[in-house]
Amino acid sequence: MKAGRGRRIVIGVAAFEVAAVIVAAIASPWVGKNTSPSTLSDSLAEPSWNHLLGADQQGRDVLVRIIQGARIALLAATEATLVAVLIGIPLGLLIGFRGGRVDLVAMRLIDSISSIPGVVLAIALIATLGTGLSRSMLAVGLVFSMVMARIARGQVLAERERQYVDGARVVGVRRRGLLFGHVLPNVAPALIVQATLVFSAAIAIEAGLSFIGLGVQPPTASWGIMLADAQDVKEISPFQSVPPGAAILLTVLAINVLGDFLQGLVVGNQRSGEGTVLDGVRVQRSPDAAPAPAGASLVVDTLDVAYRGRNGTMVRAVDGATLHIGRGEVLAIVGESGCGKSSLGLGIAGLLAPPATMRARSLRLVTDDGEHELADLDPRDTSWRRHVAVVFQEPAASLNPVHSVGHHLRRALRQRGVEPTQRAEHAERLLRQVHIADAPDVLRRYPHQLSGGMAQRVMIALALAQSPAVLVADEPTTALDVTVQAEILSLLRQLCTDLHLSVMLITHDLGVVAELADRVAVMYAGQVVETGSVLDVIATPLHPYTAALAASVPRNEAGIGIPEPLEGNVPEPGHWPAGCRFAPRCVHAVEACLAESPVLAGTGGRAFACIRAAEINLVGVPPRRS
Amino acid sequence: MTTTDALVALRGVTVIFRSTGILGSRGELTAVRDADLTIGAGETVGLVGESGSGKTTLGRAILGLVPMERGTIHVAGEDLATVGQPFPARIRRKVQAVFQDPLQALNPRHRVERLVAEPLRIHTDLRGRQLQARVVGLLEQVGLSAGLLRRRTNELSGGQRQRVAIARALAVDPQVLVLDEAVSALDVTTGAQIIKLLERVRPAQGATLFISHDIARVRSVCNRVAVMYRGRIVEFGTADEICGDPRHPYTQLLVASVPDPHPHRVTTVGRASFTVDPTARAAPDGCPFAPRCPHADDRCAVFPDPTVLGTRVVRCHHVADVTTHPTEVPR
């Protein structure tokens, strides 16, 4: 977990405070024994060397009383927390795990008890149980046990649905084993965090109850009683209320800070930075960029993307990618996961999250109104996103659940500067463009009311709202059913033709590639290893990696049997081998492959990076026999 | 194949999900309806369909993870309905599963050693050194080194995780293996590795149910294939019959939608697809595919009885008039 320097200091101070209170509580029986018995002559003494924090009305040393109060506070909070944990957690686990009607009835009961403010309920319980520290804390603990039960139950309900519970049942684990061996260890961290919050609240409540005379009885020292005593003499000695007040405030605050810190450790840092604006992404351009190929709409020249690795060094995920996409053309980027496909797509879309960095000799768009060098733009410039739109794999996750489809589209149109009066009509036109028949109805719907295919159509409409020149489609159909996939692919194909949209299609599915792409770039370990027309690359590959991918794909044909797998894994960024990166997995590799890095080269739009291409005979995907 | 010599036999299996309120049932969803299915010894049967078709629920019914409303499931001669829930250990060890996402299906807090040892602890007397040796043996069998014993699943690659899940499933020598989208979340290369591994290690005389949405993959690994749509099995036959010569209009649509990896595009005109009227609803007891079906008529308000065509069973009133459909729709 990343914590800022200021935050680390706060956590350190809080830990120190809590440690001091614990030490004080343990040491309190021996504190004050050696000091002189209280004398009324010291009554309300100002802080001095004799009494560091002064003395109270009866001449007792305030510091000693604070230290003795710490013991009471911790004892009280421990008791209340133990009661809350021992009653609340088993109760919550039980009703959460049983579920069904038991859960319904128990939860309504717990809800109604929880709806009464805790202190009021504690006072009512004290009225029946009687006053005194342990009784009042039993009451407080009972109140908090309802909170614990509710949280434990919620955690278990969520955890029970996790598939590993089914997995354990299939293996034969019984109910008790499921609850204590599987579910409890997974929910325990959240419950521990909650217990710290109960602990700090109990300290405050103990002080409050003692203050109004329902908790510890005088002459025992408690921070609440000290505060009550100070109240009586506030006209004469206002300082009296400061030490107990500060003790309560700081202790409660410190325990909350530590609880928060614990929670951070448990949950992990899920805050992913506001937006994915390119703060910290630096685009560097060198002046010797190559001229754009004729008809190209997007030109990418030697693009690198790097991320900060675990040890802080920058690790390259994309290494010198050079490619172009023609107007109205679909370029597919294929390769296994971990090859840099998505990083390349995010880089081109200007969506890399910091602290990623991107470097390119040139990254430029050629549109009707001239050339735009994106590498010259401020990464935060919204015009980047106007030129390059993105569609992701999970359409529903990319839509804000609280806004309707119409709201999403109108906001996108506003950003593009469309007049308010025309936005509604324009939004409807966009939906019709993605073949949504009942556009007015869909405009009113919310993301959860859309099927997967419909949501992906809406995402495409949103992308089109910016009239982009380039659309980056990252696994746009992977999450969809195959019949819906066919419809979306057909839609994308039509949009390319009608709108002259250039599409960068990122996918691992060669079927989708064959269906939609005009050209293909194959990536392995951050590098482009082969490019060419889709027919050339897939049917007659020149790089062994492309051939291995083609051989792994199952096909709907009789008598094909199980495809031969490519063994091994893609090396992780930062652990790329010297020489040809594919060589360790390549059946054609010779010693020379390990020595030199092959360069992507070729003619006529066909290029490959393999030194053995001329000597080996590679097989791609043959035409269908039927 | 008759019910008696099948290792797994489902007859009229119906699963209904109910959401309960304080005063009783509030709503219900029939996830699987009157499903008949058999898997013979040494056979792999594919179960295909789109999301919401009920194929996962049917697999879960065989695993005893969802209660059945009606119907019977026999596994190796035992009637699952009569053995009670949770299954006694002798049934449990006969039926094991591998799920789609091992990160979800394996307890994230447990290490590989514990994950693989868990079924052995429950079903065998192996303890201590012998237990550890068996765990290492299982890991080697699925191509993992003993060096991974102390890792948690989040420290493994996707392929390694699925290998752990397979080792765990194989630990008790099951007779029936349910593979629920076991390779769908993996890269095509890793998926091919896992399929190859499963071919090698799965019990040779056992029954395998291969649940998947990937027709091409199903054809390459299965002997027979059942097609589900909205809870109903609409067609069941050999893999070549179903994937190469589908007869139910839904199977035809499904097969025609599978993109082939060979680029053979002739025109850029979109492929034909059956139109979907979002307002159309299937009759409650009718054919669930009728609202999307080009052949639908009044007869489709009643779900048809099975028509047997050689080794295949089709449930469509129009099976006689539906022509043998090309697997490729003209584009």
Image (cartoon, coloured by chain):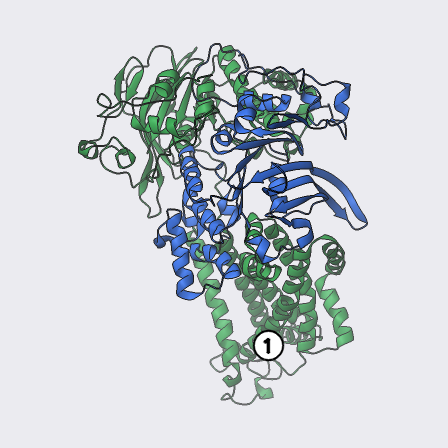
Quarter of the image where one finds residue A216 = bottom right
Residue at 52% x, 20% y is A489
- Where residue A480 appears, as percent x and y from the top left, is 56, 29
| x 40%, y 25%: residue | A333
Chain green in the figure, letter: A
Camera-side residue: A433 or B111?
B111
Q: Is residue A300 visible?
A: no
The local secondary structure at tag 1 comes to: helix
Left or right of B290 on screen, residue A6: left
Left or right: B106 as drawn, with respect to A295: right
Name the side, left or right, on which A142 lies relative to A495: right
Residue identifier under label 1:
A72
Q: Quadrant of residue B271?
A: top right
**Mark 1: few/some/many CA within 10 Å (<14, 14-19, 20+):** many
Q: Is residue A212 above or below residue B59?
A: below
Percent coordinates x, y for residue A554 in the rendering: 44, 28
Q: Which chain is blue?
A: B
- Which of the pair B207/A550 is nearer the observer? B207
Residue A174 visible? The answer is yes
Number of marks in the rendered image: 1
Q: Position of residue B259 (x, y in %)?
A: 49, 22
Residue A159: x and y in percent read: 59, 52
The correct choice, above or below, for A165 with respect to A442 in the image is: below
Above or below, comparing residue A162 to residue B209 in the picture: below
- Residue type beneath disc 1: Ile
Chain at tag 1: A
